[in-house]
Image (cartoon, rainbow, N blue to C red):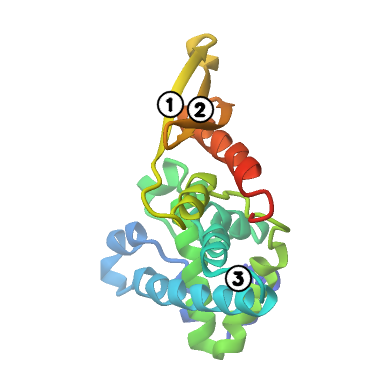
Amino acid sequence: MLSELEAGLGYVFHDKKLLRCALTHSSYANENRASGLHDNERLEFLGDSILGFVVADYLFRQNPDKPEGELTRIRADLVCEHNLARAAATVRLGEFLLLGHGEAATGGRRRDSIVSDAMESVIAAAYMDGGFQAAKGIIDRLILSDVPKGKPRNFDYKTALQELVQRKKDQVLHYELVGESGPDHDKRFDVQVLLNGQVVGAGSGSSKKRAEQSAAETAIARLFPNEI
């Protein structure tokens, strides 16, 4: 059964115990303490660092003209819980997890937090089993094969706008809710962003947060058209 997962990962483990450990959730280990099983939390810790380094190295080499702030945002998007869960789904990682009865019964195999942690654990297990290139191969195959073109999927326009206006001293940004419409299940919010008291952008969204992001995006397009 594990051979199916290894085929998806593009790496065959020499020590299958490492892979099994990477797939062992704490709930399963706690229910089977007599067996001496270890959960994947230590591997997750290591995998997080390996993943962060490989992604940072890739972005640094592939984007020589991008500033540190933008590289940081792209990296955050690539290593976020949702994106790791998406990568894990491509190899059906959740199906191979060892979960306690409670976690399994409540949909743990599909829970982003659990499968994303397991993805990091598998990366670490590959590193321990076959060295850096083994871990990098999995990251290249499952995560860096789908780097978004242009802006990252979760691009933070509010942070970007804040960084741009702070190039000058004493700049004050303020977001103001100016409208709200629609029924409770389908609300629409209208927001303006003001710079030093002057309206510089406006936007709408299904939440205040999304409306603020939209307003920040229009402000950047107006004030800094060639910056982002």
Left or right placement of residue 67 versus residue 174 in this view: right
- In the image, what residue type sits under mark 3? Leu
Specify few, some or many for label 3: CA neighbours under 10 Å numbering under 14, 14-19, or 20 or more: few
| Residue 152 location (% of width, % of height) | 63, 55
At a point 36% along the width and 60% down the height, the residue shown is 28
According to the picture, the residue beneath numbered tag 1 turns out to be: 176
From mark 2 to mark 3, how far is it between C-alphas? 53 Å
| Residue 4 location (% of width, % of height) | 67, 68
SS state under label 1: strand
| Screen quadrant of the C terminus | bottom right
Q: Is residue 183 visible?
A: yes
The residue lying toward the viewer, choosing from 131 and 211, is: 211
At a point 73% along the width and 58% down the height, the residue shown is 149
- In the image, what residue type sits under mark 1? Glu
According to the picture, the residue beneath numbered tag 2 turns out to be: 192
Specify few, some or many for label 1: CA neighbours under 10 Å numbering under 14, 14-19, or 20 or more: some
From mark 1 to mark 3, how far is it between C-alphas? 54 Å
